[in-house]
Every structure is written in structure tokens, then in C-alpha cells.
Amino acid sequence: MTQTSTSHPHDPGVVVMRAIGITKTYGATRALKGVDFEIRPGTVTVLFGENGAGKSTLMKILSGVETPTSGTLELDGEPLELKDTVDASRRGIAIIHQELSLAPNLSVRDNIFMGRETMRGGLIVDYRAENGVTTRLMQRLEEDLDPRTLVSDLRLGQQQIVEIARALAGNARVLIMDEPTSALSGHEVEILFRLIRELTAEGVAIVYISHHLEEALEIADHAVVFRDGELVARGDRRDIDINWVISNMVGRNADDLSPDLLEQFGEPVLTLDKIVVVDPSNPGRLAVDGISLTVHAGEVVCLYGLMGAGRTELLEALAGRSPIASGTVTLAGTVINKQSIAERIDLGLALVPEDRQRDGLVQTMSVGENASLANLLTFVKGIMLGRRAERDAITKGITDVRVKTSGPTASITSLSGGNQQKVVISKILMTEPEVILLDEPSRGIDVGAKAEIFALMAREARRGLGVLFATSEVGEALGVSNRVIVMSKGRIVGEFDPKHSNREALMVASGESTERENGLIA
């Protein structure tokens, strides 16, 4: 995407919403420390900061999800006390949450109108009217979805589109977007950015949180950086760049965040020979079409491609979540095509899934319970669970990957996204794998946490593990791997040495550059 300059006919001195001296404490934890923040109509203000820096906490306060411990809010210069999100919505304030808050057992239409149903005669829901509005919203977002489709039947990116549509249905004056693109394809991101420009031209104030730094800077008019509960830096887009963001966020330059990779590798630990996987959502289509590759001990191999390239389907088939139609998978000399997920884990192959909330963690369990879940049987002695051995392994695991938590008994939901991802990785490492598969391991986490995750990958590679990870971010593909395999439409279309390759080469191979030339990506 190219930088697009945006001018607004709105008075730059006008403030639609203001936070003054906002603090928020949770027990002994001070999540916000006297934050002052302004939102102006017709502009996009981007918030940067590591997980736990206070960004999402402030946004929850601005949208009525949370109440501040102290400090005041103003709307149009008048004091504002929000009872809840319904009250905020009535006043024209809407939020798109980082973690999806949809009801999977309800339709697209019912999710969009949940809590604000269109009534006919004050007695019955006017489903026809709601279907019409839903269809128009989907058309605006260029997503061909039937309003009656169950959300549980949608892929993650489509669910994110529904979440966005629900916020748009409220005709908000202030629209808060917390990681809105974390599950979107490049084309869907461009559609969202076009919509943001339309909304700001109409005077809507956008507050935008993202860990995709370059992407966020493309849509920003202003930027602020949070660190440790404080707003530590402000800047207009014309005055800032990536290094300004990173140095204010973590106190280090971007070049200091790359992991230390090996240059010499061991024997092959994972070999794929002409792997074919049928698309589980469309049996008439091949999601993976004849892929062959080898991963060596100590090597970090990246699968790069656009949404729909087949990366996720390949990794899930290797892990045993979906069947392999043909071809051979060999793990450390053993063919594993017919093994179950548990058997593949025992043999030394395990997956860190793309959606950690749905597939990687059990939300009702503690940090420790999640960490030991995949390896629980090793702690069973006779008919009893060896609690001390399990506890020692959990403590070692969360220390080893540096999970920031109050302890193993803490709720998994109390952790930031980056620390939740570390728990998933700790769970996988506890099984003592030969090869680890990671699908979009940095999705929805900040630049500092990304650096820690990729440092973990590099560390395990140095210990002799083979690492195969998938990403849709070209910077990650080039910055944290020994070799990049580019996929498109289920096939390998290129192989690159990151030391001697550039972004454009990967983008041309994946087809993204063609999309840009055709105007699909700005």
C-alpha cells in the first residue's frame, strides 16, 4: 500500500471527545496513569504500544466497557459518564474489539443487530429490513455474505468483517478500531482503508490501534505511543516514521529486534513429498497442490503468501487436523501420514495454530493448566496425576519462554496477547518436539512481543529443532527466517534466500504486486 495524503475540511481545533487525567487500577496494577487524550472529527489517530501498555484499557473506557478509577471524559466539551456500551452507542461511540465478540450460533444479521433489533409495530423483529441493511453493509465492505449465514460457518477474516459491519451499523461519530485487520487479507485491508477514508471525509473520528506498524502509518493523520500505562509520545504523520514508533515503544531501534539464526544446519527432520490437501470448506478445490519441501534441524523456514495461498491448510494437515489426500510426510525418518494428532505430537511434531483464542487455549483454564495440557499424560503415575511434577514442569516452561504472569494459577484471559501466545508455545515445547509448526505466530501482538516470539523460534532452532512458520507479512518473512517459500493458490511459486532478496521479489512471486498494479491494493 502506498501512502495516501488525506485532507479534511474540518476545523483542526475542534475536539469531539477528550479524556483528562484518566487512571485505571486493577488491584495493585496501574493500567493507566493520568492519561490525557483527544479525539478530533475527520481524522485518524493511531495508538501504538506494546501489549499491556494501556491502549486497549483506555479504549474500553472511552467506549463504556470499563469505568475509570479517576479522571473525566468529555463529549463535545460536556462532562460524560458512560454507563455501558449501549449508552456509548446511543451517544455515537462504537468499538471494534481486538478479540472477536460475535455469537457463533447466530447469523450474520443477528450479530449485527444484537441488542438494537429493528422492530415492526413495536412487537416483532423486522427481519426483512435487517436483511436489507446487512446486505448493504456487506456490499460496502465488498464481502458477498448471505445475512442468514451462521457466523460459525465463516472463516476468521469474514468474522472480522462482520465485527466491523456491526460497528458501522450504529452510525458512530467516534469509531474505535482495536486491531481491525489482524485476520484480514491484503485486499480486505484495502477495502477497510477505503472505508476509513470515506468515514473521515464525512467527519467521523477514527481511533485506530494496530501492531502492524507500517500499515497503521499509512492510514494515520496523527499517532500517539503508550508505554507502561502512560502516553509518552505524540506526532503528526508527516513528522514520524517506523523508527520513531519503535524507539518510543520499546526503547530500541528496529534493527535490534532481529533474531540470531544459525547458518549451518543438521539432517532433514521434516520432508514433504508432493503433498495434496483438499479444501475442507470446498471439496472440489485443492487447498494444497503437490507441495514438496524439506526442513533441516536448526533451520527456520518461512511459508509466505496471501490469504488463500494454502499456508494454513498445509500446516494443519501436517499436524493431523485435516487429512492428506496424497503425498508423503516424513518426520525424522518416520512416515506419519496416518497418525493422529496425539501420535504426531508423541513423534515430535506440533502446531501453534493461527487462532490462539479458539484453537490454542482453553479460556476457562489457568495459565498453568493450559501450559501442561498437551503433555498431561506424562505426569500420570498409575491412576493419579503427579501434581508436583506437573507444577515443576509448568514453572520451568513459563519461566523458559518468559511469560509475564502473576503465576501459574492466573487466568489465561488476564494475559496480554503476546503472553498468551507464549503460553501456547510453552505448551508445545513441553512435548519436546523435533519440529514446531507456527501459523501466523505474531498475529495481534505488538512489535516487542513479536521480537520475543521470533527470538524463541531462533533459540529453539539453535537447539536443533526444525521450525516451519507461516506469515502474510513480508517483513517477517525476510527478517526472521533462513529460507522463504512463497506459496500461491496451493503451490510453491518461489524460494528465496532472505539475505539476497527484497520485498518486491516476494510480493511479485506471491501475486501481491500484481494486485497493487491493478489497484486492488493501494
Image: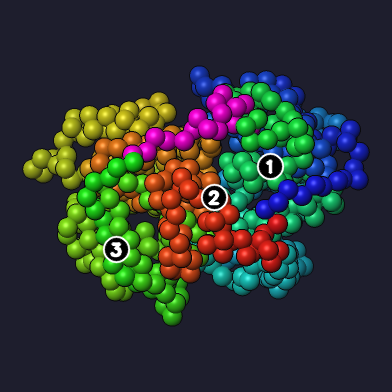
**Disc 3 and disc 2 in contact, CB within 8 angstroms:** no
| Observer-nearest of 5 and 20 | 5
Q: Which residues are magenta?
A: 245-262
- Looking at the image, residue 449 lies above or below residue 118: above
The CA span between labels 1 and 2 is 21 Å
Of the 4 image quadrants, the one containing the C terminus is bottom right
Query: Tag 3: residue type?
Result: Leu
Q: Earlier in the sequence, mark 1 or mark 2?
A: 1
Q: Nearer the viewer, mark 3 or mark 2?
A: 2
> Residue placed at 83% from the left, 42% from the top?
41
Neighbourhood count class around disc 2 (C-alpha, 10 Å): few under 14, some 14–19, many 20 upward: some
Amino acid type, label 2: Asn
Closer to us: 343 or 236: 236
Say whether residue 6 is visible: yes
Task: Specify the label residue 217 is tagged with.
Answer: 1
Residue at 52%, 62% (x, y): give it.
509
Helix, strand or loop at disc 1?
Answer: helix
Q: Which residue is mark 3?
A: 272
Q: Secondary structure at mark 2?
A: loop
Q: What is the C-alpha distance between the residues marked 3 and 2? A: 26 Å
Camera-near label (1 vs 2) is 2
Q: Residue at x 31, y 70 (%)?
A: 274
* Residue picked out by circle 2: 502
Q: In the displayed image of the protein, which residue is found farthest to the bottom?
A: 284
Where is residue 410 drawn, in percent x and y?
39, 31
| x and y, in percent, of residue 406 in the image | 40, 25
Residue 411 picture quarter: top left
Query: In x, y percent, where is residue 324?
Result: 30, 70
- Residue under the point 46% across and 45% down: 499
Q: Is residue 53 visible?
A: no
Side of 502 where 270 appears, left or right = left
